């Protein structure tokens, strides 16, 4: 299976990745990073990620790397 | 059908072999263009405006011959920004215009200063303000020497007064601009641009002893092969960065003030009256000095060659012992202020000036001088 | 596990100053990806004028020249004419390209300068706090159209890309959006063609990217993406214009 690796320190919590992940595998952690943003995390136990890279494509901070 | 082009001189001298010994006859405008090309300028962008159109037309013919780029831009603003791009890529670049067009370029010139880019801007001054007229003037002195754009910056300002000197000045304009990474301005006027005089292409560096030195440009934008990326900018947002940059500029200007101020002095040692004039006005004043000398009056002349840095050394007692100075300009007194600052009250300063296209005549100046 | 999506080499691994959900970050990445794809990072010279993206040189890892507001295409003309073998592109906002810089834009295009233009259209002035842009839609509220843009007072959204397409010197014009992954992929393809045109000496190429500005549209990032899809695209239809 594939998975997105999110650089928590660069994420600004814009939520676009969550919005475009049609499997709902990404969610806000509720924790703040150094930027003061509520960063996003990949839901490890729901690992049905097919590696479509939609999350990475829409990320304005280019802080999502996808591995397969 | 033969089209009779304006500026017959251009037709006669199309492709004239520029022979080192032989003199060639060109207008001031065209001599500036030829001088620039021989000084290594390979990019020119201009826009039509009288009284400097012959310069643009000459460049349109000669620049491609020299393997350079000629563009008639859509505006003076576009032209100065094209020059900024060419200069940023490491090429010797230049634009020319006249007073109203130079006003349009002020933001671009401030950006050149802010990005420490060498480039040459030629202003063949005309009557102002506003649309003014196309006669000669020296009313842009403040704009050129005090900085017409925003921010604390200076341009090197060179003021040739003859066609030969206009040709030679281009070598200094480019090499000094590159030596200090500042924009340099050639401040001429409509008369200097239109007058035709024979000049020779002898030792180009003769102008004020400036060597045509090739300065390496590691900062230029050429593509980052083999080095880290270069950035040409004048934007300093982080707290304190812009102030640091300004301090660096001020240090540079202090060196220029100390080392590059130039003037031509005539019979100053025994003069008890010194005329002060630059450019075309200096030619008329040198005739006045000769006339007064014949009448037994000890007159002398200071002709600033660089207007910024202003040659304050010419006004020291050891250079000009005189205690009476007469400043003559085609304006209502702009260089006058720098003369007063240089003298700082140690001598009496009088002024004769006309603007709006008129200029003080020889007899008028002589009459005034006799009274001093 | 193999990396199937990662940061392009030409894009620095730096946090940006852009607002959360801003389209500039996506556009920066696409440009960097295309430059990597074409293998021209060491031959590229970017021109970034005043606007939110004036500090793009902090994010791109290649030579970059700053330009005064509206003058990017004049600066780029100077660079390209002097360095014809370099890949020169401008990255301009709607205010820069279609308001203060319209004259430079039209004439660089009309001269058919062999340049690539990345035109980020977010229908507003971002850097200065959300003023009306030439591409602001009718009825769109901005700090200078508090009651919404009115045609009688402020004229109509300017179709600069369609205008430029009629100039013989212009070789390629396409309008894409950054509002969903599918469109972002097409935007990358358009940028690839626009840069490739220049490399093959093809002349003036421009790609307009409809880009979200959540902060000054007063929307969430996701809502801003939808607004482009549902509203902005009606005024600025996507596709190849020339």
Image (cartoon, rainbow, N blue to C red):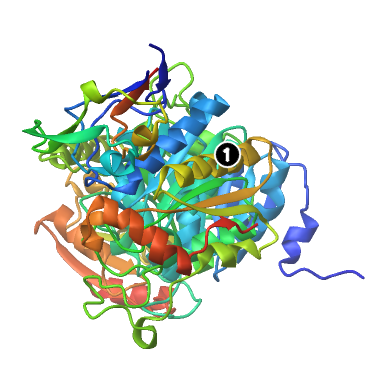
Near-viewer residue (C40 or B115): C40
**Crowd tier of the residue under label 1, counting other residues whose Cα lies within 10 Å: few below 14, some 14–19, many 20 or above:** many
Left or right: where B255 falls relative to B284? left
Residue B180, x across and y down, in percent: 34, 34
Residue at x 33%, y 49% (from the top left corner) = B111
- Pointer 1: what residue? C195
| Rendered image quadrant of residue B77 | bottom left
- For residue B158, above or below residue C129: above
Residue C135, x across and y down, in percent: 40, 67
Left or right: where B60 falls relative to B262? right
Residue B4, x across and y down, in percent: 82, 70
Left or right: where C15 falls relative to B101? left
Residue at x 25%, y 25% (from the top left corner) = A46
Q: In what quadrant of the picture does the N terminus of chain C appear?
A: top left
- For residue C80, above or below residue C109: above
Element under label 1? helix
Q: Furthest residue to the right?
A: B1
Residue at x 43%, y 27% (from the top left corner) = B217
- For residue B225, above or below residue B47: above
Instruction: Name the subunit of mark 1.
Output: C
Q: In what quadrant of the picture does the C terminus of chain C appear?
A: bottom right
Residue B62, x across and y down, in percent: 69, 48
Near-viewer residue (A31 or C165): A31
Near-viewer residue (C37 or C186): C186
Q: Furthest residue to the top?
A: C1
């Amino acid at each position: 299976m594939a998975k997105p690796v999110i650089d928590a320190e660069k994420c600004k919590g814009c939520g676009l990745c969550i919005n475009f992940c049609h499997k709902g595998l990404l969610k806000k952690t509720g924790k703040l990073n150094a930027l003061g943003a509520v960063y996003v995390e990949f839901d490890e136990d729901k690992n049905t990620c097919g590696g479509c890279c939609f999350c990475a494509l829409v990320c304005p901070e280019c802080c999502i790397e996808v591995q397969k | 059908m033969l089209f009779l082009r304006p500026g017959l001189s251009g037709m006669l001298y199309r492709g004239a072999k520029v022979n080192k010994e032989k003199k060639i006859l060109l207008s001031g405008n065209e001599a500036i263009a030829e001088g620039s090309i021989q000084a290594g300028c390979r990019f020119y962008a201009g826009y039509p405006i009288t009284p400097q159109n012959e310069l643009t037309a000459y460049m349109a013919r000669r620049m491609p011959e020299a393997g350079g780029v000629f563009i008639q831009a859509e505006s003076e603003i576009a032209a100065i920004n094209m020059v900024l791009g060419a200069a940023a890529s490491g090429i010797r670049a230049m634009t020319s215009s006249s007073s109203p067009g130079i006003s349009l370029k002020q933001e671009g010139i401030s950006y050149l200063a802010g990005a420490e880019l060498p480039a040459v801007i030629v202003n063949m001054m005309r009557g102002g303000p506003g649309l003014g007229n196309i006669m000669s003037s020296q009313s842009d002195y403040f704009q050129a020497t005090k900085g017409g754009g925003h921010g604390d910056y200076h341009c090197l300002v060179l003021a040739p007064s003859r066609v030969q000197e206009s040709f030679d000045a281009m070598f200094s304009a480019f090499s000094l601009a590159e030596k200090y990474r500042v924009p340099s301005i050639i401040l001429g006027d409509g008369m200097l641009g239109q007058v035709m005089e024979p000049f020779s292409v002898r030792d180009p560096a003769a102008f004020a002893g400036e060597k045509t030195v090739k300065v390496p440009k590691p900062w230029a934008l050429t593509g980052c092969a083999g080095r880290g990326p270069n950035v040409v900018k004048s934007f300093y947002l982080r707290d304190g960065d812009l102030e640091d940059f300004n301090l660096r500029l001020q240090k540079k200007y202090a060196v220029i003030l100390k080392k590059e101020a130039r003037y031509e002095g005539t019979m100053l040692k025994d003069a008890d009256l010194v005329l002060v004039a630059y450019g075309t006005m200096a030619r008329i004043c040198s005739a006045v000095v000769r006339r007064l000398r014949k009448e037994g009056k000890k007159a002398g002349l200071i002709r600033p060659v660089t207007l910024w840095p202003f040659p304050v050394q010419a006004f020291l007692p050891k250079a000009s012992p005189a205690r009476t100075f007469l400043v003559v300009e085609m304006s209502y007194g702009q260089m006058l202020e720098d003369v007063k600052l240089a003298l700082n009250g140690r001598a009496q300063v009088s002024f004769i000036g006309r603007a709006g296209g008129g200029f003080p005549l020889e007899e008028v100046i002589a009459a005034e001088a006799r009274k001093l | 596990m193999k990396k199937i999506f990662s940061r392009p080499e030409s894009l620095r691994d730096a946090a940006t100053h852009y607002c959360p959900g801003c389209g500039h970050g996506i556009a920066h990445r696409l440009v960097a990806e295309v430059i990597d794809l074409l293998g021209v990072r060491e031959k590229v010279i970017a021109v970034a004028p005043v606007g939110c993206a004036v500090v793009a040189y902090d994010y791109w890892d290649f030579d970059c020249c700053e330009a005064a507001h509206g003058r990017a295409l004049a600066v780029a003309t100077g660079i390209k004419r002097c360095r014809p073998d370099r890949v020169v592109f401008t990255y301009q906002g709607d205010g820069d390209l279609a308001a203060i810089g319209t004259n430079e834009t039209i004439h660089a295009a009309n001269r058919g300068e062999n340049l690539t233009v990345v035109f980020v259209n977010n229908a507003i002035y971002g850097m200065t706090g959300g003023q009306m842009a030439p591409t602001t839609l009718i009825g769109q509220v901005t700090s200078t159209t508090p009651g919404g843009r009115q045609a009688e007072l402020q004229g109509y959204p300017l179709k600069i890309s369609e205008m430029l397409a009629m100039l013989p010197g212009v070789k390629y014009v396409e309008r894409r959006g950054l509002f969903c992954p599918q469109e972002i992929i097409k935007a990358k393809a358009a940028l690839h063609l626009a840069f490739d045109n220049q490399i093959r000496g093809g002349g003036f190429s421009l790609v307009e990217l409809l880009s979200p500005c959540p902060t000054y549209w007063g929307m969430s990032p996701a809502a801003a993406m939808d607004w482009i899809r549902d509203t902005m695209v009606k005024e600025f239809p996507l596709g190849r214009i020339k």
